[in-house]
Image (cartoon, helix red, strand yellow):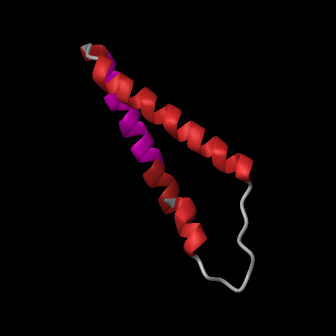
Amino acid sequence: MHYLGMAALRLHGDVSYAPVLVALSVVIAVVAATAALWAALNIKSPAAVAVAYRSSWARRSAACITREWRR
């Protein structure tokens, strides 16, 4: 959706992108989504669920801290 939004922009400047980086970002997104779906459907041990919960909490905390720091 980001690239569609970029294509929809009407600016007086030049908007450009590197096709190789666009393709790489699509590949990374598909691989990450596939890995997340596989993990959600196959990992069921309580220890793995606890680790995933703690790591998601840490990522959210880091995101909030860096967001506040940038303001």
Q: Is residue 64 magenta?
A: no
Q: Give the range drawn in magenta.
A: 48-62
Look at the image and tell me whether residue 71 can be seen: no
Q: Quadrant of residue 48?
A: top left
Q: Where is residue 37 in the image (x, y as percent from the top left)?
A: 36, 29
Q: Where is residue 9 in the image (x, y as percent from the top left)?
A: 58, 77
Q: Quick check: 3 left or right of 21?
A: left
Q: Residue at x 40, y 30 (%)?
A: 36
Asked if 71 appears above or below 29 in the picture, the reply is below
Asked if 47 appears above or below 50 in the picture, the reply is above
Q: Where is residue 28 in the image (x, y as percent from the top left)?
A: 57, 37
Asked if 66 appears above or below 44 in the picture, the reply is below
Foreground pick, 38 / 63 = 38
Q: Which residue is drawn at 74% across and 55% down?
A: 18
- Magenta segment's dominant SS is helix
Look at the image and tell me whether residue 64 can be seen: yes
Foreground pick, 11 / 63 = 11
Q: Quick check: 53 left or right of 20?
A: left
Q: Quadrant of residue 38?
A: top left
Q: Residue at x 47, y 53 (%)?
A: 65
Q: Quick check: 23 left or right of 37?
A: right
Q: Residue at x 46, y 50 (%)?
A: 63
Q: Which residue lies furthest to the bottom in this view?
A: 12
Q: Position of residue 22 (x, y in %)?
A: 65, 50
Asked if 2 appears above or below 57 in the picture, the reply is below
Number of on-image labels: 0
Q: Quadrant of residue 51?
A: top left
